[in-house]
Image (tube, helix red, strand yellow):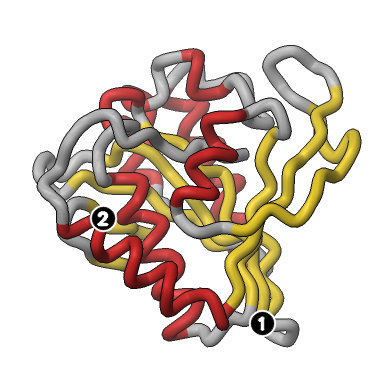
Amino acid sequence: MLEGRFVRLEPLDAAHARDLFAAAARPEIWRYMPLRGFTSEADVERWIELARANAESGSEEPFAIVDKSSGKAIGSTRYLDIKPSERALEIGWTWLAPEHQRTPANTEAKYLLFREAFEVREMLRVAFYTDAQNGRSRAALVRIGAVYEGTLRSHRARAINSFERDSAVYSIIASEWRKVKTDLERRLARPPRFGTGALING
């Protein structure tokens, strides 16, 4: 469990299904994701089961993003493509309920994941792959200090409209973490306000 001021990241579990079904109700969440959304709480439970099965291989680690003020799960994120021998991993499958997208929740969730990756697991590289058409996500990645590396053509399929997507690749590396950390801590120390934007990346 990764604990912050506004959110904590808990290992994704069936106990989060009811909250996540409510959090995931708005279709715009899934526009750039490889999933059409959930039609029932049972759908969420199956999605969690699959995520946990993938985690057993050690290549993924899924989390529920829990709002500390309410105690409810408001979204999810995960480590992907974890390669301890290469000291590299990806952060993806990030989504939040719309009412939490312009709050510190996403910034702090990313901060907690970065701190764990660089300071505890001693990773050299944290990568992101986001839909090249998702301008909001791309701008948010730059704001948190990620560096654009290029675009992979026809990299993945988009579930909502069933056509190929290009993926824009961003990363933060260990030598950049100190500055990124300072900037994020400065942002998180400010009084919470709306209008800061949110990062949603598939």
Residue 187, label in figure: 2
List x then y, in percent, for residue 29.
Answer: 49, 23
- At a point 31% along the width and 67% down the height, the residue shown is 2
The correct choice, above or below, for 53 with respect to 124 in the image is above
The correct choice, above or below, for 120 with respect to 46 in the image is below
For the question of whether residue 180 can be seen, the reply is yes
Q: Amino acid at mark 2?
A: Arg
The correct choice, above or below, for 115 with respect to 197 in the image is below
List x then y, in percent, for residue 128.
Answer: 64, 53
Residue 49, label in figure: none
Of the 4 image quadrants, the one containing the C terminus is top right
Question: For residue 193, which quarter of the picture?
Answer: top left
For the question of whether residue 58 can be seen, the reply is no
Of the 4 image quadrants, the one containing the N terminus is bottom left
Of the residues under marks 1 and 2, which one precedes in the sequence?
1
Q: Secondary structure at mark 1?
A: loop
Q: CA distance from mark 1 to mark 2?
A: 27 Å
Q: What is the crowding at mark 1: few (fewer than 14 residues within 10 Å), some, or many (at least 20)?
A: some
- At a point 40% along the width and 17% down the height, the residue shown is 25
Left or right side of 7 for 171:
right
Q: Amino acid at mark 1?
A: Arg
Q: Secondary structure at mark 2?
A: helix
List x then y, in percent, for residue 108.
Answer: 31, 55
Along the line of sight, the residue nearer the viewer: 174 or 36: 174
Left or right side of 32 for 156:
right
- At a point 61% along the width and 55% down the height, the residue shown is 53
Along the line of sight, the residue nearer the viewer: 38 or 116: 116
Along the line of sight, the residue nearer the viewer: 17 or 5: 5
- Which residue is labeled 1 in the image? 87
List x then y, in percent, for residue 8.
Answer: 26, 57
Question: For residue 89, which quarter of the picture?
Answer: bottom right
Left or right side of 197 for 39:
right
